[in-house]
Image (tube, helix red, strand yellow):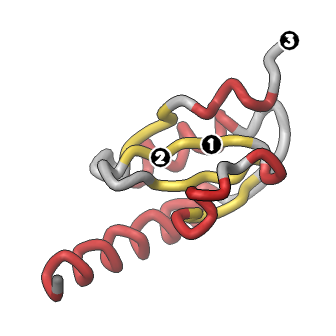
Amino acid sequence: MRKLGFYRKRVTSLHDEPGESARRILLACVPGTMSFWIDHQSDIHADAPNKIPRAAEALIVGTYSIGTPIADIEDDLRTERRERARSWITD
């Protein structure tokens, strides 16, 4: 049986197609509710909400569980892409 900390590894990337990333994120929720954060290289990682590293708390893009509509996850990923692009342009 997997431990919830297993997904601390990369799940997908913000550079990947949002629909495919949303499906990978939803599959990562099979053990239970997971929080997802995006690092500075745009890699998306997951862990149980109570196990998120303190340094990653500001980088959380969402907390999802099985049953979350894929469209909602895709919207969150697209929003994060836009925000990062806007930030990159203004920095």
Name the residue located 77 percent from the left edge and 45 percent from the top edge. 51
Where is residue 28? Give x, y as percent. 66, 35
Pointer 2 and pointer 1: residues touching (CB < 8 Å)? yes
Look at mark 2 in the image and give the residue it sits on: 44
Q: Residues within 10 Å of mark 1 (few under 14, many from 20)?
A: many
Name the residue located 34 percent from the left edge and 79 percent from the top edge. 83
SS category of the residue bearing label 2: strand
Give whichever of discs 3 and 1 has the lower sequence position.
3
Depth check, front residue: 49 or 81 = 49
Where is residue 42? Give x, y as percent. 34, 51
**Residue 30 falls in which quadrant of the image?**
top right
Look at mark 3 in the image and give the residue it sits on: 1
Give whichever of discs 2 and 3 has the lower sequence position.
3
Name the residue located 66 percent from the left edge and 57 percent from the top edge. 54
The quadrant of the rendering that contains the N terminus is top right
In this view, which residue lies farthest toward the bottom?
A: 90
Amino acid beneath label 2: Ile
In three-dimensional space, the C-alpha distance between marks 3 and 1, rounded to whole angstroms, equals: 17 Å
Where is residue 21? Give x, y as percent. 45, 45
